[in-house]
Amino acid sequence: MAPFRLLLACVPLALASITVLDPSDNADLTADAADNALEVDYTTDNGGPSYLLYNITGPYYYSDEDAEVSHQTLSVNANDTSVLVATDGAVVNVSYTDVVKKGYSTWLNQASFFGVNAAINVANASTAYIDHSNITVHNGAANVYSYGTGSTVYVNHTDLYSSGPVSHGLYASGNGTIYGSNLRHYSGGSRCSSFSGDNPAGYIHVTDAVAHTAGIGSAIFYTLGESYGTDVVGRAERAPSLFSDGAQTSVFENVDFTAGLLAGTVMFSSSTRSSGASLTFSNSRLTTLGEDMAALWFGNLIASATIHATELNTTSGILVIANASQITQSFDHFVGWEENSSIQPAQVSVSVTESSLTGDIVAYNGSSIAWSLAEHSSWTGAASFGRGTAYVGVTLDATSTWTLTKNVYLQNFTNADTTNSNIQSQGYSIYYNASSSSNAWLKSTNTSLPGGGRLQSY
């Protein structure tokens, strides 16, 4: 693959051009084509039960002991087997070591929820320190897995490569935690996110990393718990940069993400609609490549997002979509309430500070978007409605500006600049709901806007 060419935001207005080497440059991708063509099937045929069937085992097994592995090559070629296991309070140091895992996972739920078949599995209040190493997995296996409260992995200066389905780079579940820094990760298979949490929760902290995923459903981050990324460059060829399922927390600072399928970020609830999901981008850039891809997408969820000193670059011209929808198990398309009557509308609040954004915000099927601009932000775009009744509110502080690109109909409108001099209407009008109590301050205003449009009630 060609090197990444990107711009990293060091400060909001200072951008530097650099070249980042792709993590797959030194891999034989052709040799792993059959692995990466395997489809993920979470039906009873291949998903299997969600309770643990196997003893987590491997040729390098450490239980309730301290161990050190240095300047070695560790490998295994067997199904449902790890290479190195640390469990029951073990403390293991791995440095300058190659870890190679081959062999398939019989049941995908076993790999997802318990790390069966992971190259390195750290569980049951154990700790692992991994540095200056290479971890390679084939046939479908996580590189590094942390499971259970008190289980913590520290991974530094390490390259991660994976092929086959469910081959996440860093993977935490059951309240396990992983801290990674100075990492490079590539995955070629489907449902293989670079940095992932799983049920009931995983806690992922990544700094100074480069990640590249090629498969469908393989995001840079998959949040089920909490994800933190700082100074991360990531490209997801056929996935968003982020999947977040439920009331989870995702925080990104000084990152540069490129997404090739669905949306830049996809935040949803795979079960009943939950409340409390949050997303933060600061001093970052998010790019979407598809003609129908929004930067931020929300469905079946009540969530908040903060965009600070960040670029949202979209081919579609859509910044935000809120819908009564969610992602399918195939992770390649959205499904709506027409196919699943339990799906509910999204309710989203987006706070934008010190950012200049161009594009529309769109609400569908009873969903709502509260869009707020503050701290010298600017927005060129409009609020639109898709199918069904939906609700959009816009708030401007006195330092921020809005340039309209079409007529808009708002449920709520608040402007700290009561003269509306911070709005350039370009001949378009803002219509607001006169019956909304939030608009009482307007007193049924019907007045002109700079540029020839009007502010009036409906």
Image (tube, rainbow, N blue to C red):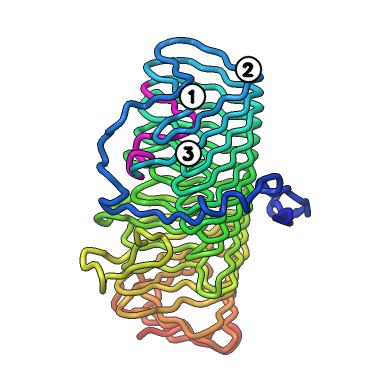
Instruction: Tell me the quarter of the image containing the C terminus.
Output: bottom left
> For the point 37% across and 82% down, which residue is it?
444
**Marks 2/1: CA–CA distance:** 13 Å
Q: Is residue 419 visible?
A: no
Please tell me whether residue 346 is drawn above or below residue 413 in the rendered image. above
Q: Residues within 10 Å of mark 1 (few under 14, many from 20)?
A: many
* Magenta stretch contains residue 316: no
The magenta span reads 108-124
Identify the residue under disc 1. 84
Identify the residue under disc 2. 70
Given residues 406 and 41, the one toward you in this image is: 41
Given residues 300 and 239, the one toward you in this image is: 239
Residue 142, disc: 3
> For the point 49% across and 33% down, which residue is it?
77
In the rendered image, residue 297, in percent from the top left (x then y), is placed at: 44, 63
Which element type, helix, strand or loop, lies under badge 1?
A: strand
Q: Is residue 12 left or right of residue 111?
A: right
**Three-letter code, disc 1:** Leu
Given residues 283 and 80, the one toward you in this image is: 80
